[in-house]
Image (cartoon, helix red, strand yellow):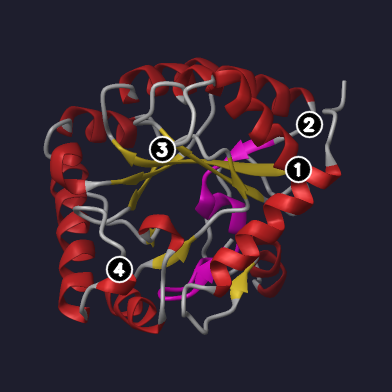
Amino acid sequence: MPLSRKPSTAVAAAATLALALALTGCSAERISPESVRDAADEKAGGAFGSVDCRDAKCIALTFDAGPGPYTAELLDILAAEEVPATLFLLGKKHIDTYPELVVRAAEEGHELANHTWTHPRLTEVDRDEVRDQLLRTNEAIEELTGQTPTLMRPPQGRTDDTVAEVCEELGLAQILWSVTAKDYQTTDSDLITERVLDQADRDGIILLHDIYEGTVPAVPGIIDALKADGYTFVTVSQLMAPGVPEPGKVYR
């Protein structure tokens, strides 16, 4: 059965996000996954995985600020559902506290990305601090997994031209989102599920956090409902294949 959609809720969410983006101070265009695919040719190098999102109805499930106490349960759910996710990892008290979960996530095929070392607003620190926050996290992930992230998400979605320039230097594309459950505001898993399903659309990037009590219990219902509505889950990079997100650019 198709999902019941609440257009007014989705429109309001989009308007809120647009206002937030307008306040970031970054002059970069926000690029959609569809436009990345449309601009790419077959030799662009983006990896499809098991699905081509030019044909399939794709959506990306992303989690910020882990790993944490609930991440093992999340990985169990994703494994059981055979759903890949993109994990934007924090460094201090996260990567360095749960290194085994970083390794497990990589081994199970999830995309590992950068969410800084200590979660500062990158628009409020100097260039050297932006670089240190991102470089330290990249190095920690690479040391554990052998993989160097190519994606980052600025805390609170706050970016500007300086952040973009540093990201370009470090080979990191900036990934925002099109769906937010604001799960930092509530422990109500049913409400989190409802908020995601109200906003979900083709080529969507869902923002959740695996560090909050109510979020991980909401994940099975979100996955089941979206699968029933014909969605295929992919990583952020797979969503853009055969295109490849460019370092420094902002995508949502």
Q: Earlier in the sequence, mark 3 or mark 4?
A: 3
Can you say whether 81 is above or below 117 in the image?
above
Mark pair 1, 4: CA separation: 33 Å
Amino acid type indicated by mark 2: Gly
Amino acid type at image mark 1: Lys
Q: N-terminal of the two: label 1 or label 4?
A: 1
Residue 195 x/y as whole percent: 66, 34
CB of mark 2 within 8 Å of CB of mark 4? Answer: no
Q: Nearer the viewer, residue 135 or 50?
A: 135
Judging from the image, what secondary structure is the residue with disc 1 in? loop
Residue visible at 15% across and 39% down in the picture: 93
Q: Earlier in the sequence, mark 1 or mark 2?
A: 1
Residue tagged 3: 110
What's the CA distance linking mark 2 and mark 4?
37 Å
Q: Is residue 240 magenta?
A: yes
- Residue at 56%, 50% (x, y): give it: 238
Q: Which residues are magenta?
A: 232-251
Whether pointer 1 and pointer 2 mark residues with C-beta atoms closer than 8 Å, the reply is yes
Separation of residues labelled 3 and 1 (CA atoms): 19 Å
Residue that badge 4 annotates = 122
- How far apart are the alpha carbons under marks 3 and 2? 21 Å
Q: Which residue is mark 2?
A: 230
The disc labelled 4 sits on which kind of residue?
Leu
Instruction: Using the numbered discs, state the Cα–Cα distance from disc 3 to disc 4 in whole angstroms.
Output: 25 Å
Q: How many numbered badges does the structure rendering display?
A: 4
Which residue is denoted by mark 1 in the rendering?
57
